[in-house]
Amino acid sequence: MIALSIRNLSKTYKNGHEALINIDLDVAQGDFFALLGPNGAGKSTTIGIVTSLVTKTAGSIKIFDIDLDSDTEKAKSYLGLVPQEFNFNGFEQVKHILVTQAGYYGIHAKEAAPRADELLKQLGLWDKRHTTARSLSGGMKRRLMIARALIHRPKLLILDEPTAGVDIELRRSMWGFLQKINEQGTTIILTTHYLEEAENLCRNIAIIDRGRIIENTDMKSLLNRLDKQTFIFDLKSPLPEGINLSNINYQQIDELTLEIALNKNESLNAIFTVLDQYNIEVSSMKNKANRLEELFLSLVEKSEATL
Amino acid sequence: MNNWIAFRTLLTREIRRFLRIWPQTLLPPAITMTLYFIIFGNLIGSRIGEMDGFNYMDFIAPGIIMMAIINNAYANVASSFYSAKFQNHIEELLVAPVPNYLILAGYVTGGIARGLCVGLIVTVVSLFFTSIEIQHLWITLSMVVLSAVMFALGGFINAMYAQSFDEIAIIPTFILTPLTYLGGVFYSISLLPEFWQNVSLFNPILYMVNAFRYGMLGVSDIRIEVAYAIIITCIIALSSFALYLLNKGTGLRN
């Protein structure tokens, strides 16, 4: 089953700007899907059209096989949206916001109230349930928007930069929460500027640039395309004098740090074997840059070069 | 989808909003209308004498109540819907499977609720100054509701087009208030020269005020059936236009 099917979607704004040019996209049911792209690429326009906040110029959208134009209400009932900007009434109490949103989906307050309680507890907002939304911290507001998007138990959840401006601890706890609801069967589409987030969470990915989908594949195949990776090795002791590491492509950053570039056909074992010969112990190792980030930049650069 | 629950939710939210900010929504009309009764009714009215066979205070009471109802029905929808646009929380509704006619009905009914609430408050205030007995109960009640519907629709259309809070204030200040004062709240149009009597007939508020006055006092400058026909026609035209704007996404969707 396809959760979201987009066909020939185009959007031209009144000022003539072509935000989307004939894009096609499928997201399978149960997927955790990343929609990435540089600023102004068309991600938010795509999400806006799918969630009925932006009118399209041409094309069609189906949500769980329901056409958004011909059976709008039914198609919308499957969707939950966590937008990029805070968009709740700051003067309303946290729990009221959730119960009201449930009401818009035809859920009676008696049924919505325990659902709201459960979500507020899961997202660490239980103590704030009677607080007005404007008094919440930035991270709490983000969690409130997630709770609001989930109150009607959508089959497809769209998150537009859900962790923007959120500290790393909270971001990781939100990742855990999203993974859990995805495992429970909710299809998730995520846009993010934290490529580490997309790499960790998403199984499939589409990259959009200047209104066109320039890549649409699974995360594993995409990452396999990396020709070269650069690792940072932290050493326990400085390199001995006169050491010969000529068969390793490395650069010494300081006496305890090496930057080693590894081609796709080379293995890390070979590096460790050489280092082991000289009794060089490695205390830690990490990628210099996020793998997806390297690919993302190369794809976007390639796309710009072809225009 | 249970549309009734969605409608009730929206209406409850609207009522909760104007009750939460009652010092801005319910108190000012009570004070203003009390001042009208004291100044125009009591102090000046006592020198005016009778109008259409009633003492001046009794004559203006229906007009003042109606003025409060239409102003508040209009203001409630205009400010609530524009605030929802301004704070972007209108998106909560646009994303949800709520049909456009239900969004319109929810906001308009919210406006009617505030209009009725304020109307009730002003009526209670008026009882300290007058001793009106309602002559035609159903005409009085239907005119209250129809007038509130019409002006709530006006407020909705105003908010759809508004790009700033100033634009929410322009229509009430430069159009609604003059039309209200010229709509026979404080006088019978029979006092005007014939030309201005004819001009007054283009003012829809004249029909509301007079039909309402007929319901309360049994006197009117215009025929009641004409008032109903004009108000119902206006309601059909305004609701069709508001729905057209909503379907088009004017001021809401890019």
Image: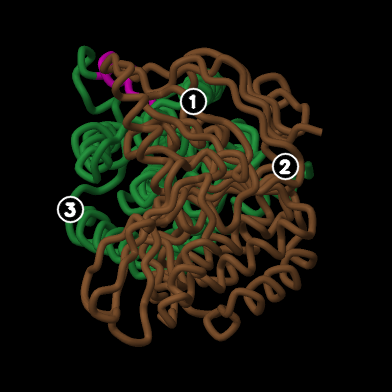
Judging from the image, what secondary structure is the residue with disc 3 in?
helix
Dominant secondary structure of the residues highlighted in magenta in the image = helix
Q: Residue at x 50, y 58 (%)?
A: A197
The green-tinted chain is B
Query: Which is closer to the viewer, label 1 or label 2?
Result: 1
| Label 3 Cα crowd, 10 Å radius (few <14 / some 14-19 / many 20+) | few
Measured from the top left, where is residue B142 in percent x and y?
60, 38
For residue A213, which numbered disc appears in the image?
1
Residue A66, quarter of the rendered image: top right
Query: Which is closer to the viewer, label 3 or label 2?
Result: 2
The brown-tinted chain is A
- Have a look at marks 3 and 2 and say if they share a chain: no
- Have a look at marks 3 and 1 and say if they share a chain: no
Q: Residue at x 44, y 32 (%)?
A: A45
Q: Earlier in the sequence, mark 1 or mark 2?
A: 2
Give the residue number, with chain letter if any, for mark 2. Answer: A78
Q: Chain of mark 2?
A: A
C-alpha separation, residue under disc 3 versus residue under disc 1: 79 Å
- Magenta stretch bounds: B197-204
Decide which of B120, B251 is in the foreground and name it.
B251
Relative to B145, say whether A134 is above or below. Answer: below
Judging from the image, what secondary structure is the residue with disc 1 in?
strand
